Image: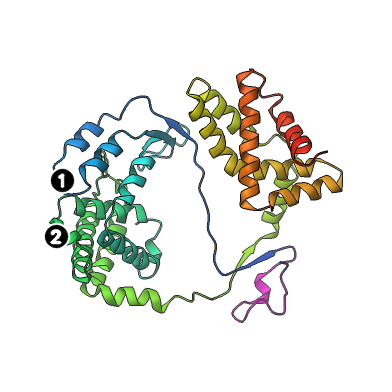
């Protein structure tokens, strides 16, 4: 919505908003990160050592499942001596998801408490000490823990919480937190003064963690309406990108999927196409709508985007089948895939 200079909300100063700014009004928001990843052929060399470690948690079947997961490399700057044009890191997304799903109720509650503390008393350090760091600390303290402490009781939740807080304090003071899977220091390059400052803050929290948790709830306004300003220059960038007639990156993603899985089984190619289209197709349809002059077509496409989940699933299945047929006939390439999808949308869905 456009800003109302005389009444944005009770706590806002109208002079902070310039002409052309857009003010977003919301009660909650969510986001997704999409990161290009390259699958590894074979297993990381440290994974055998991880599998053979003596442990109480996670269970053996989870360890085997993680060991057999696909691993990736992603473009991400190193913690020290960064070279953004060259740096890559190992990504254990699938393994970490399986590890998280294997957590007991005690572990999950401890993670939720730590996230609450991170968002309240440790908010100033949230970009330095992340949720990933806290989860790693929970994993290390759970691996060789007395199995009785993983039984769901309030006492066990508090005991594990104290263990993790003590562990994190020591890691910060030594600036060493080992990755759970590989010998890599997650605190490499951390400023010494900052690390001790955070450690001292956690030491205070450790004295009364219940009080720290109450501080989180005291600061929460769950029905509070929030406002966020989008500067005029950002709005102009969005409009330019929105109306940019250049080919969509979604087309490149589709072609990469087809190239990557063309030699795989039928089921894997279908599954890969379905996964990427579930996220990408609505954006592609919207892009196609912007390129056409007929308002009725634009209206029909918009209605398609906003249609029910069942219709979307049916439509995606239809597109997958159509693309799969074209792939088998070697009729898909970087020059015609956009035309293939657009014809499918107009002819089979909109009957144009």
> Seen in the image, is 123 located left or right of residue 153?
right
> Seen in the image, is 26 located left or right of residue 243?
left
The local secondary structure at tag 2 comes to helix
- Residue topped by disc 2: 148
- Residue topped by disc 1: 55
- Residue farthest toward the bottom in the current orientation of the protein: 10
Q: Which residues are magenta?
A: 3-20
> Dot 1, crowdedness within 10 Å: few (<14), some or many (≥20)?
some
* Occupied quadrant, residue 62: top left
- In this orientation, which residue lies closer to the viewer: 322 or 282? 322
Q: Residue at x 25, y 37 (%)?
A: 64
* Occupied quadrant, residue 291: top right
Q: Is residue 18 magenta-colored?
A: yes
* Occupied quadrant, residue 70: top left
- The numbered disc on residue 103 is none
> Seen in the image, is 312 located left or right of residue 129?
right
> Dot 2, crowdedness within 10 Å: few (<14), some or many (≥20)?
few
- Which of pointers 2 and 1 lies earlier in the amino acid sequence? 1
Q: Residue at x 35, y 70 (%)?
A: 121
Tally of numbered discs: 2
Can residue 139 be seen at all in this image of the molecule? yes
Can residue 191 be seen at all in this image of the molecule? no
Q: Residue at x 56, y 37 (%)?
A: 274
Q: Is residue 77 magenta-colored?
A: no
What x and y, as percent, mark residue 30? 53, 58
> Seen in the image, is 155 located left or right of residue 93?
left
């Amino acid at each position: 919505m456009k800003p109302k200079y005389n009444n944005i909300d009770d706590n806002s100063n109208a002079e902070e908003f310039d002409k052309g700014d857009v003010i977003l009004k919301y009660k909650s928001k969510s986001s997704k990160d999409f990161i290009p990843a390259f699958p590894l052929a074979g297993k990381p060399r440290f994974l055998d050592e991880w599998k053979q470690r003596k442990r109480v948690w996670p269970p053996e079947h989870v360890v085997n499942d993680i060991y057999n997961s696909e691993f990736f490399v992603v473009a991400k700057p190193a913690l020290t001596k960064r070279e953004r044009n060259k740096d890559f890191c190992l990504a254990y997304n699938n393994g970490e998801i399986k590890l998280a799903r294997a957590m007991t109720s005690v572990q999950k509650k401890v993670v939720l408490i730590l996230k609450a503390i991170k968002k309240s008393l440790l908010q100033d350090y949230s970009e330095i000490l992340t949720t990933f760091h806290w989860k790693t600390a929970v994993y290390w303290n759970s691996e060789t823990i007395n199995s009785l402490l993983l039984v769901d009781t309030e006492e066990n939740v508090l005991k594990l919480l104290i263990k993790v807080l003590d562990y994190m304090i020591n890691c910060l003071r030594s600036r060493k937190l080992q990755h759970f899977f590989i010998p890599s220091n997650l605190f490499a390059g951390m400023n010494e003064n900052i690390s001790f400052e955070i450690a001292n803050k956690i030491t205070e929290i450790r004295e009364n963690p219940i009080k720290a948790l109450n501080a989180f709830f005291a600061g929460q306004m769950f029905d509070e309406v929030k406002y966020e300003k989008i500067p005029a220059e950002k709005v102009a960038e969005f409009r330019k990108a929105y109306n940019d007639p250049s080919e969509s990156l979604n087309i490149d993603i589709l072609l990469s999927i087809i190239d990557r899985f063309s030699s795989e089984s039928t089921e894997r190619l279908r599954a890969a196409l379905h996964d990427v289209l579930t996220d990408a197709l609505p954006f592609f349809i919207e892009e196609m709508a912007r390129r056409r002059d007929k308002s009725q077509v634009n209206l029909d496409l918009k209605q398609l985007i906003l249609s029910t989940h069942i219709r979307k699933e049916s439509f995606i299945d239809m597109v997958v089948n159509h693309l799969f047929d074209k792939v088998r006939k070697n009729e898909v390439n970087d020059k015609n895939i956009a035309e293939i999808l657009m014809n499918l949308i107009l002819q089979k869905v909109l009957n144009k």
